[in-house]
Image (cartoon, helix red, strand yellow):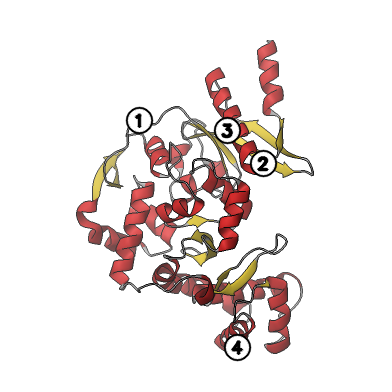
Amino acid sequence: MNIARQRLHRTFLAGSSHATGRDVVRALGAVQAQDYEGAKWALSMRTSGATNAELEQEFDSGAILRTHVLRPTWHFVDPVDIRWMLALTGPSVMKRMAVYNRRLGLEETMFRRSRSVLEKALRDGTYLTRPELRTLLESKVGPLGAGFQGNQRMAHLMMRAELEGLICSGARRNKQFTYVLLDERAPPTASLERDEALLELTRRYFRARSPATPQDFSWWSGLTVSEAKRGIDIAGADLEPVAIDDVKYWVHGDVPSRARPSAHLLPNYDEFFIGYRDRNAIGRRLKSARMVTGGSALIAYVIAVDGQLVGGWKRSPGRDVVKLELNLLDRLTTAEEKRVLAEVRRFEAFVGRAVELHGFAARRSARTAR
C-alpha cells in the first residue's frame, strides 16, 4: 500500500465533490489555520473551485469558524462541531499551556477577570479586534507589559477564552481579525458525552487521513496516545489494522483506488502532512521530509508531485499581480511540469489575479532550449 497516494484520496486532494469550504472543514474535522491565507487555499484545493473571495465570505458569514482547538494553534472548524470539540480537547490544551502561563505571570484570577471583561465588551453581537480588546483589558484588568512578553500575555488571555468556549472568530474588518461571543456566532447544539465525542473525532480523523497510527492521531488531536488508542477501541469494526513496512496502521473503510497523476502547491500547514506525527511517507522521492518537519515557523509552502515532495514555493502579493517563486529540488518529467503549471493556473483562478511565475518558468525554458 502506498501511504502517500492513499492519503491524497483521504484528504480530498485526489478528486473532491465538495462545493464549499465548510464542507471540507466538516469532512476533515478541523483544518489548521494559523496561516489564514494558506488555509483558505488548502480548502479551495479540496473543492470544485471555490475562490478566495467565496471562502472569505464563508468565513465572514460564520459558516466557518476559527479558534484554538486540538493542539494549541488556530484551526478552522464547523460551527456545529466547535462546542463538543472544545469540550473534548480544550482541557488538554489548557493543561499543556499552564507552564507557559506561569512563566508569563498569568494567574487564574487574571483569566477570570479577563473573561468578565470580554463577555461584557462583546455582548449584543459586538465584534472587536485584538488591539481594541487589549486596550479594554489593560484599562480594566491591568497592564500586560510591552514588547514580546506583553503580546504573549494578550495572546494567552485570548486563547484561554477561546478554549473555554467564550469567544471565537468574527467577520474580518478591513482584513483585521475580530472576536465575537461564541454563543452569538454559532447555534446551540446538543452536548456529547466524552466517549461519544472521542468516537466522533476518531472517525473523522481516520476517515479523512488513514492509513495512520495512534501516535499520528494523538499528535493531530492533542489527546494523549492512551486516549487515541481508546478512540480506536471504541470505533471497533469501523477501523481495520494494516501492517505496512512492519508498522501497524489503522484504516477506515475501503481502500481508495489508485490515485491519478497529480501535482499540488501545498500551503505550509496542509492537512496532507500536518495531520501526522510521522511525515516520512511524502519524503521518499527526495529521501527527506525535512521541509515539513521543522519547527512551526520553519515549515515551508511545498510542491508535491504524486504525493511526494519535490520542492517549495513562495507567494508575494503585489498591487496588480501575485508573484510565485517555485524552487525545485528534483528534476521533473515534462508531464510532471505540465501538472505543476496547471496548479499555478488553478491558484491564479483562486486569487482572482494574474500570477507572475519566477524560477520554475526560467528553468523550464532553459531545459527546453537544451
Question: In front: 275, or 349?
Answer: 349
Q: Tell me which amino acid carries mark 3.
A: Glu
Q: Quadrant of the C terminus?
A: top right
Q: Tell me which amino acid carries mark 2.
A: Gly
CA distance separating discs 4 and 2: 44 Å
Position in image of residue 166 (x %, y %) = 52, 77
The secondary structure type at the circle numbered 3 is: helix
The residue carrying pointer 4 sits among few (fewer than 14), some (14 to 19) or many (20 or more) residues within 10 Å by Cα, namely some
CA distance separating discs 2 and 3: 14 Å
The secondary structure type at the circle numbered 1 is: loop
> Who comes first in sequence, dot 1 or dot 2?
1
Label 2, on which residue? 352
> Who comes first in sequence, dot 3 or dot 1?
1
Label 3, on which residue? 343
Q: Is residue 28 left or right of residue 161?
A: left
CA distance separating discs 1 and 2: 32 Å
Q: Residue at x 73, y 61 (%)?
A: 174
> Who comes first in sequence, dot 1 or dot 4?
4
The secondary structure type at the circle numbered 2 is: loop
**Foreground disc of the pair 1, 2:** 2
> Who comes first in sequence, dot 4 or dot 2?
4
The secondary structure type at the circle numbered 4 is: helix
Label 4, on which residue? 113
Label 1, on which residue? 258
CA distance separating discs 4 and 3: 49 Å
Up/down of 33 relative to 16, above or below: below
Q: Which mark is residue 211?
A: none
CA distance separating discs 1 and 4: 55 Å
Q: Are the residues tagged 2 and 3 within 8 Å (C-beta)?
A: no
**Foreground disc of the pair 4, 2:** 2
> Who comes first in sequence, dot 2 or dot 3?
3
Q: Are the residues tagged 1 and 4 within 8 Å (C-beta)?
A: no
